[in-house]
Image: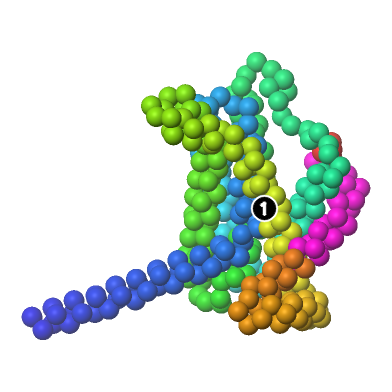
Amino acid sequence: MSGLLALLDDVAGIAKVAAASVDDVVAQATKAGAKAAGAVIDDAAVTPKYVHGFEASRELPVIWRIAKGSMKNKLVFLLPAGLALSAFAPWSIAPLLMLGGAYLCFEGAEKVYHLVAPHTPAQITPEDVPGDPAHLEEAKARGAIKTDFILSAEIMTIALAAIPSSNFWFEAATLAVVAVMITVAVYGAVALIVKADDVGLWMARSGRFFPTRAIGRGIVKAMPHFLRLLTAVGTAAMLWVGGSILIHGLEELGVAWPAHAIHDIAAMFGALAGEGGAATVEWFVTAAIDGALGLALGLALIPVAQRVIAPVLAAVTGKPAAPH
C-alpha cells in the first residue's frame, strides 16, 4: 500500500510539473503573441478584402480555407524553420527580425502614401476568370494564403525572438501555441467582421422589436467606418512595431545611440507629466517616435521596392511587376 501511495504521489508531482509547464508555455505564448501586435492587426485588416464580392454563403468557407492555409504556413513551414534558426544560426534571428521590421515599415508607409496619392489597385475580378466563380475563389484564396505567409513569417519571427532561451521542446510548444492562438484570433475576428453586416441586415429586416431593428441598422452603417478605423489602427501598429523592431535590432548589433536617444526624449516628456502619468506618457512618446522613424524608413523603401526589388522579382518569376 505504501508503495502504491508513493507511486500516486510521484504521479501527482509529475502532473503538477506538467501543468506548470503548460502554464509557462501559454504565458510565454501570450507575451510573444502580444509582441507581434502590428503584424496581427494588419493580418486582420488585410484579409477581409479577399472575400469581398463573393456570395454570402461562400464567405465563411473561403475564410476557413484561408485559415487552414495560414495554420499550415505557421506549423508546417515556419515553425520548423524558426526552430532550426534558433538551434543552428541564432545570430541570424536579429537581422531577419529587422528585415521583417523593414517590411512592416514599407507596408505601413505604402498605405499612407496611397492615402495621400490615391490609386486604383489591380484586383482579381470575375471578368478576369470568366464563366467559373470557383476559379475566382481559388485565385483569391491562393493570394490570401501567400500574403498570410509573409505576415505569418513576421509574426513567428517576432514571437521566436520574444521567447526566452530554453530547451527545444519548450520553444516548439510555445511557437505552436502562438501559431494556433493567433490564427484562431485573426480569422475568428475576420469571420465576425465579414458577417457583421449580414447579421445587422438580418436584424434590421427581421427584428421583432424596434431596438433590435435600430441596432441592426446601426451595425450596417457602422461597419464601413469600423473597417476604415481597423485599417488605420493596423497601419499605425505596423509603423510602430516595425520602427521598434529596427531600433532594438540596432541596439543588439551594437548601435545603441538611437534607443538611448528615444529613451531620453520619452523620459523628458514623462517628467513633465508628473509621477502619476509618467509611464503612460513615456510609452506613447516612444511609440510615436518609433512610428515616425518607421514611416520615414518605409517611405524611403518605396522607390527601392518599385525600381529595384519589383523588376528583379518580375525577371525571376516571369510575371509582370504589380503596379503601385
**Is most of the magenta stretch helix, strand or loop?**
helix
**What is the quadrant of the N terminus in the image?**
bottom left
Q: Is residue 60 left or right of residue 89?
A: left
Residue 314, by quadrant, is top right
The residue closer to the viewer here, 39 or 118, is 118
Residue at image coords 49%, 54%:
180
- Foreground: 273 or 185? 273
Mark 1 nearby-residue class (10 Å; few <14, some 14–19, many ≥20): some
Residue 165 lies, with reference to residue 48, above or below; the image says below
**Mark 1 element type:** helix
Q: Which residue is mark 1?
A: 233
> Disc 1 residue type?
Val
Residue 271 is covered by the magenta coloring: no
Does the magenta portion include 294?
Answer: yes
Instruction: For the C terminus, give its image quadrant.
Output: top right
Magenta stretch: give its range: 290-317
Point out residue 215 in the picture as x, y percentages from the top left corner. Answer: 49, 36
On the rendered structure, is 182 left or right of 280?
left
Residue lying farthest to the left in this orientation: 1
Q: Position of residue 27 (x, y in %)?
A: 47, 69
